[in-house]
């Protein structure tokens, strides 16, 4: 039964990729999304090096997404998760830094999305580095804004509180 599902999924993937290539070409954001879906598949199958290669190919190709495109944030988030699985923490922090910069450019410094990206970076600094002072400064500035704007049942909100508690 599983083999039948895998076969159907591969067939649908090939049909989808063919349609995207036919109608939009291989230099379109739609084709980039096909490649990112493939990278996510590699990530789920725990083939992290292939996921990294595919995601980097999309991110480094300027024809797919502009530097400040929301889809680039999703690609960087996938790359961040991949680097975390590969224990490449400096590269993972670089991804979070780029996400923060893109959110700042897209939404502005007062937006909750920007401050959530900042808190994600601070959480990384708390859990995987020794940049506690930087993380504390971020929490002092960003947590009150996120606390007011985001519902407390939000899936990331618990992580923010947990990471904040690790500071003390």
Image (cartoon, rainbow, N blue to C red):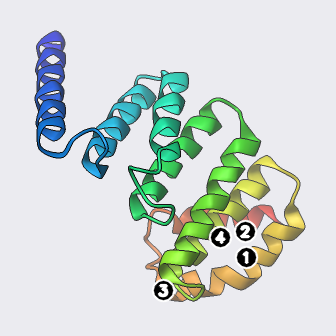
Nearer to us of marks 2 and 1 is 1
User: Which residue does the image show at 67% across and 45% down from the upper left?
Assistant: 92
Instruction: Give the residue at mark 4.
Output: 118
Discs 2, 4 touching: Cβ within 8 Å: no
Question: How many numbered marks does the figure carry?
Answer: 4
Nearer to us of marks 2 and 4 is 4
In terms of image quadrants, where is residue 20?
top left
Discs 4, 1 touching: Cβ within 8 Å: no
Where is residue 166? Give x, y as percent: 78, 61
Instruction: Give the residue at mark 1.
Output: 139
Figure check: 153 above or below 71? below
Q: CA distance from mark 4 to mark 1?
A: 8 Å
Instruction: Give the residue at mark 2.
Output: 164
Figure check: 54 above or below 98? above
Q: CA distance from mark 2 to mark 1?
A: 7 Å
Discs 3, 2 touching: Cβ within 8 Å: no
User: Which residue does the image show at 44% across and 41% down from the upper left?
Assistant: 58
Q: CA distance from mark 3 to mark 4?
A: 14 Å
Q: Residues within 10 Å of mark 3 (few under 14, many from 20)?
A: few
Q: CA distance from mark 2 to mark 4?
A: 13 Å
């Amino acid at each position: 039964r599983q083999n039948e599902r895998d076969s159907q999924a591969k067939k649908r993937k090939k049909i989808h990729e063919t349609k995207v290539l036919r109608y939009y070409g291989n230099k379109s954001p739609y084709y980039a999304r096909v490649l990112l879906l493939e990278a996510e598949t590699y990530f789920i199958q725990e083939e992290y090096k292939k996921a990294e290669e595919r995601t980097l190919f999309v991110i480094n190709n300027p024809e797919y997404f502009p530097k400040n495109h929301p889809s680039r944030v999703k690609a960087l988030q996938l790359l961040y998760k991949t680097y975390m699985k590969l224990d490449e923490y400096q590269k993972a922090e670089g991804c979070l830094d780029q996400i923060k910069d893109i959110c700042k450019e897209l939404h502005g410094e007062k937006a909750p999305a920007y401050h959530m990206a900042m808190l994600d970076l601070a959480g990384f600094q708390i859990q995987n580095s020794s940049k506690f002072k930087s993380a504390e400064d971020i929490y002092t500035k960003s947590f009150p804004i996120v606390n007011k704007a985001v519902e407390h049942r939000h899936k990331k909100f618990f992580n923010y509180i947990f990471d904040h508690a690790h500071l003390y």
